[in-house]
Amino acid sequence: MLSFWEKESFISYDIIIIGGGITGLSAAISVKDINPKLTVAIFEAGIFPSGASTKNAGFACFGSLSELNSDEKILGTDKMLSLVENRWKGLELLRKRLGDKQIEFQKFGGYELVFNTNFQDEEIQIMNKKLKPIFGQEVYFNAPNLIKKFQFNQEIVKNLIFTPLEGQLHTGSMMQELIKKVTRLGIVLFTNSKVETITSNGVIVNNIEFKSAQTIVCTNAFTKNILPDVDIIPGRGQVCITKPIKQLKLKGTFHFDEGYYYFRNVGNRILIGGGRNLDFKKEQTTKIELNNKIQHDLVSKLKTIMPSKDEYEIDHSWAGIMGFGKDKFPIVKRIDNRTVIALKLGGIGIALGSTVGHTAAEITFN
C-alpha cells in the first residue's frame, strides 16, 4: 500500500529507463541534455548493473585490423566503416562527457598480435586508406620492434600491429562518474529494482506501477525477460586478472584472433579475457558463472604468449553478460508509441553505449 507522499513524489515520471548500465545512464543524461525540465527515473535489476557495464575489461577500442577485415567480408565496406565510425564517436562522447582524468583514461595505444608469417604490410595500407575519412590520419602501423620489449614469445608472435588511437580506462571509475552525473542532473536511480512488465502506463516493479509518458529499454541481453520477441542473443564474457607482477613492461590494450581474445595491463597486473569462441553454445547464457574450460584456456594462452620465469598467479576471475544478434549493429528504434529499445552492443558497450543511449533519447522526442 502506497502512502499519499509516495504517490505524489515517487511514482510518476516523464521518462522511465529500464537498465542502469552504460547505455541506460547515457540515455538518461542525453534526455536531460535535450530537455532539462523532464523528470527521469532509471530502474536497474541488480545492485550493480546486471550485464557487463561494471564487468568489462575497460578497453577504449574500435576494432583490430583482423576484426575489421572480417567485418568487411561479412558486411561490406560501407557497413564496416559505419560500425567503426559509431564506435569512435561513442568513445569521443564518453570522454568529453566524463573527462579523461575522472575515468582514468590512459592512451597507451592498442596492439594486435599477429601469428601468421604470411601477413602482408599491404593489408595495413589498404585499411588505413579506407579509415582515413573517419580519423583524418593513419590508424594502423607495423611495430615488430616492440615484440621483445613487451616480452612476448618471439617464436609465436611474428608481428604487432599498433594504433595510437586506442586506450584503456578504469571501468569502476567510469561507472561511478556516470552515476554521479545522473545524480547531479536530478535523475532518480532505483537499484535492485527489476522491471516485471511494461504496461500501457509505465512499468511494474515489485508489484507497484510506476507511470511514464515514454519508456526506454536498455537491458541488452536481458531484454527477452520483458520483450520476448526482440532479436537478442546473450553472450557471456570471461575475464581474469593476475596478482601484481614485478617489473611488468606490458602497457596498452592487446587483441588477437579477430578480437575474441584480449588482454591489457591494469597497473602492474595483467587482465585477460575472451575465449567465447571456444564454447559458443554454452556461453549463450545470462548465468553469471565461470566456464572452467575457458578460464583454463585464458591462463594457458597468457603463459604461452608471455612466458615468464615467475608463475602467473590469478588473483580474481569473473564473468559479464553481453548482447549479440545476427549482425554487429545495435538495435535502436521505437517499437510502439510509448516504447524505445536500445540494445545489442556486441560486446563493445564502452565504445557504443554513449551514442546508442543518445540516439534512443532523441527517438523519444520524435
Image (cartoon, grey):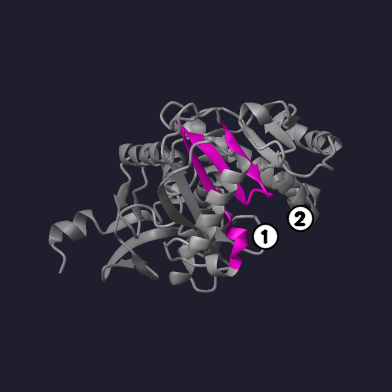
Residue that lies at the very extreme toward the bottom in this rendered image: 228
**Secondary structure under the numbered disc 2 in the rendered image:** helix
In this orientation, which residue lies closer to the viewer: 257 or 201? 257
Up-down relation of residue 82 to residue 338 (above or below) = above
Up-down relation of residue 287 to residue 263 (above or below) = below
Region in magenta: 251-280
Up-down relation of residue 261 to residue 277 (above or below) = above
Residue 97 on image: x %, y % = 47, 33
**Which numbered disc, 1 or 2, marks the residue that appears first in the sequence?**
2
Residue 301 on image: x %, y % = 59, 48
Q: Residue at x 54, y 69 (%)?
A: 282
Magenta-colored stretch includes residue 273: yes
Instruction: Name the side, left or right, on which 176 lies relative to 26.
Output: left
The 10 Å Cα crowd at callout 2, few under 14, some 14 to 19, many 20 or more, is some
In this orientation, which residue lies closer to the viewer: 249 or 69? 249
Q: Which residue is drawn at 49% across and 42% down?
A: 271
Instruction: Name the side, left or right, on which 91 lies relative to 140.
Output: left
Q: Which amino acid does label 2 sit on?
A: Leu
Question: Which residue is tagged 1?
Answer: 327
Residue 162 on image: x %, y % = 69, 31
Q: In which quarter of the image is residue 230?
A: bottom right
Q: Which amino acid does label 1 sit on?
A: Asp
The 10 Å Cα crowd at callout 1, few under 14, some 14 to 19, many 20 or more, is few
- The residues bearing labels 1 and 2 have C-alpha atoms spaced at a distance of 8 Å
**Secondary structure under the numbered disc 1 in the rendered image:** loop
Q: Do the residues labelled 1 and 2 touch (CB within 8 Å)?
A: yes
Asked if residue 293 can be seen in this view, the reply is yes
Q: Which residue is drawn at 56% across and 48% down?
A: 348
Magenta-colored stretch includes residue 66: no
As drawn, the label of residue 264 is none
Asked if residue 362 can be seen in this view, the reply is no
Question: Which residue is tagged 2?
Answer: 75
